[in-house]
Amino acid sequence: MTATLDPQLKTTRRASDDRPAAARPARPAATKPALLIEHVTKRFTVGRKRKPVAAITDVSLRLERGEIHGVLGANGSGKSTLIRLVSGLLTLDEGRVEVFGHDIERDEMAVKRLINRVSVDAAFFKKLSPMENLVFAARLYGLDARAAKPQAIAILERLGIAQKRVGRPVEQMSRGMQQKVAIARALLTSPSLLLLDEPTTGLDPRSKLDVQSFIEEVRNSHDATIVLTTHDLAEAERLCSRISILNDGRVVAEDTPEGLKQLVATRYGEAPTLESAFMTWTGRSLDDDVEEDQSGGDE
């Protein structure tokens, strides 16, 4: 069963506070969100006679500092396109995106210093070692290479890569180990906004748990805000404070994991699980492929 977005799904609101103003606790001063996405649309065109295909349509999200926000969607639903738009790898057709108050188009360099991204298809200098790749990344971000080395070793060890392995070429490592190196490379720059595009795909169960624990540690100890796309519903439920479900490039539901489960149970009579919520608002499973758009086919 497929359902359209109910206005009440966007937020589970508390009952109104009828206490006198003087009796209410003082609210903190308004602060800029860590990430603000407003009415963003992205289209792709291949061939002169083909109509543009919308990969993302009128998407709006707001992430507060320190939040881990999950984005769920079937393959081709627009998840990776959204990550690429926020990271500046794609240009916006409509709408705007701000990172801690900086417009991603007008304040491009300020934004790049605040964010880092981990893709499911991480790119490396394959002939170089993990340490050489990390030191190169540190230099790109203006970090001192000598100071970065011990930090890189600590991050790699925390992710389960022993120091004795950081000197061998990346091409000799498994795909799962390469993904860990990609995560370490992103974390080395201490980003304020970390964009994780299916970071645990291809990892064995032990490595996946290592990465999930480290993501929680980064959020708690570094005050990082994280956007996480994933195909793992258990991972989303464990890590995410809020979840947006994408379908055909649109946000069709958004709430806390518990809120989504309660909504799908009370309004649609389905089992109170994230799987039921996903199936209800998209009509498909996470492994289903949506008809490919023109954004690269790796959504």
Image (tube, helix red, strand yellow):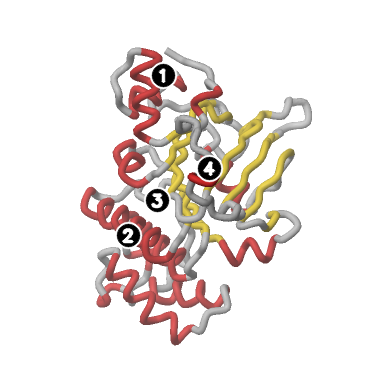
Labels 2, 3: front one: 2
Evaluate if marks 1 and 3 touch, with contact meaning CB atoms under 8 Å apart: no
Q: Residues within 10 Å of mark 3 (few under 14, many from 20)?
A: many
Q: Along the horizontal axis of the image, is 2 left or right of 204?
A: right
Quadrant of the drawing holding the N terminus? top left
Q: Position of residue 277 (x, y in %)?
A: 38, 24
What amino acid does circle 1 point to?
Answer: Thr
What amino acid does circle 4 point to?
Answer: Ser
Q: Position of residue 228 (x, y in %)?
A: 44, 47
Residue denoted by label 2: 214
Query: How far separated are the C-alphas under marks 2 and 1?
Result: 32 Å
Q: Is residue 125 above or below residue 102?
A: below
Labels 2, 4: front one: 2
Residue denoted by label 4: 80
Q: Which mark is residue 280?
A: 1
Mark nearer the N terminus (1 vs 4): 4
The residue sitting at 36% across, 41% down in the picture is 236
Mark 1 secondary-structure assignment? helix
The residue sitting at 38% across, 66% down in the picture is 170
